[in-house]
Amino acid sequence: MISATWLGVTAACIACRARPETSGFDAAEVEAGPSLAALADHVLAAPSPSDPAARLAPDLAYDRQADLRARADEARRQVGPQTVTRVEGDVFVLAAPRASPKFDQAAALARQALEALCQGGRFAKRPDRAVTAIIFDAQDPFDAHCGSRAGAEPESLFGMYALKTRTICINAAPGASTLVHEMADPIIQADFPGAPAWIDEAIASLYESPIFPKPGDIQGVTNWRLARLLRALDSVTDKGKLRVDALFAMSDADFRGPDIDLHYAIARFFAQWLDARRALWPFYRRWRDGYWTMEPAKRPFDPPWARYQRTSTTSGSLG
């Protein structure tokens, strides 16, 4: 069962196919329904955590400045004597095997993205622990480093973030924008510890193709993940999986299971659709705060989304 609105989302994406790398996502092209902001209020509204200060309190024993220095030294040890490093946002240690225009572009993009993501009330807390981001300019060194030293295998050819070591690796050969996706992961995880993978990656993957309409603003435009949605629409096997509500109760293991590429695509374009209606951040905050007030045995909760869906694919909407 696919809602008419989700078909509308996909139709709007299809309309962007001629220039997917630059086309924005126009909410006016999506079939109108009940206000998504009102829907988010109804489904996700919950009291704020009883003691948010406790959840957001920093670890006073941790010395971030010492960690930043240690991470820069470790990057030079791992990557080579010509390694260049730069700190952005007093949290991210950017490193590359050598100085290059591509590294300078990546650092400038990181600075611009951090300024936008950390403004406008998007997050209640910024990361307080240092993160290493190693930027390679070719596929082979990226592959070699991720497997042997970063502590995790990448889920794509472009980048990865290893939570255990707080290490980002990206292959900047196709472009540095994947860095914004990977930086968003630790930002979200600092603000929403234990965030479900689907909401973390929905937002992070939205910004793997970022634009900056004005200072302090960031948006994601239609990108290469659209192709996976289009294949699913044409597939008898996959078409029934195009359900946004299925994400809400999806475990991290299932999200990262055999259909990981489809799950990423659904989550990303759902986030893009929300953002086009200026509902992404109200949705995120209500989900974050509602999650924290729930009994652990009831997580993840099953929102009463079905009442907003209709069995017909030609009528009704998610809002």
Image (spheres, rainbow, N blue to C red):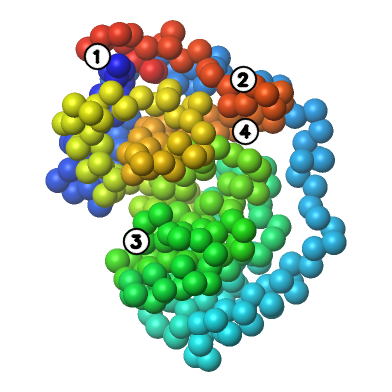
Disc 2 crowd rating (10 Å Cα; few below 14, some 14-19, many 20+) is: some
- Residue 295 in percent (x, y) is at 71, 23
In the displayed structure, 27 sits above or below 204; it is: above
First reached walking from the N terminus: tag 2 or tag 1: 2
Q: Mark 1 near mark 3, Cβ–Cβ under 8 Å?
A: no
In the picture of the structure, the residue carrying the numbered disc 4 is 288
Q: Residue at x 16, y 31 (%)?
A: 234
299 relative to 277 in the view: left or right: right
Disc 3 crowd rating (10 Å Cα; few below 14, some 14-19, many 20+) is: few
In the picture of the structure, the residue carrying the numbered disc 1 is 313
In the picture of the structure, the residue carrying the numbered disc 2 is 45
First reached walking from the N terminus: tag 4 or tag 3: 3
- In the drawing, what numbered circle is on residue 157? 3
Q: Residue at x 53, y 29 (%)?
A: 283
Which quarter of the picture shows residue 297? Answer: top right
Disc 2 on helix, strand or loop? Answer: loop
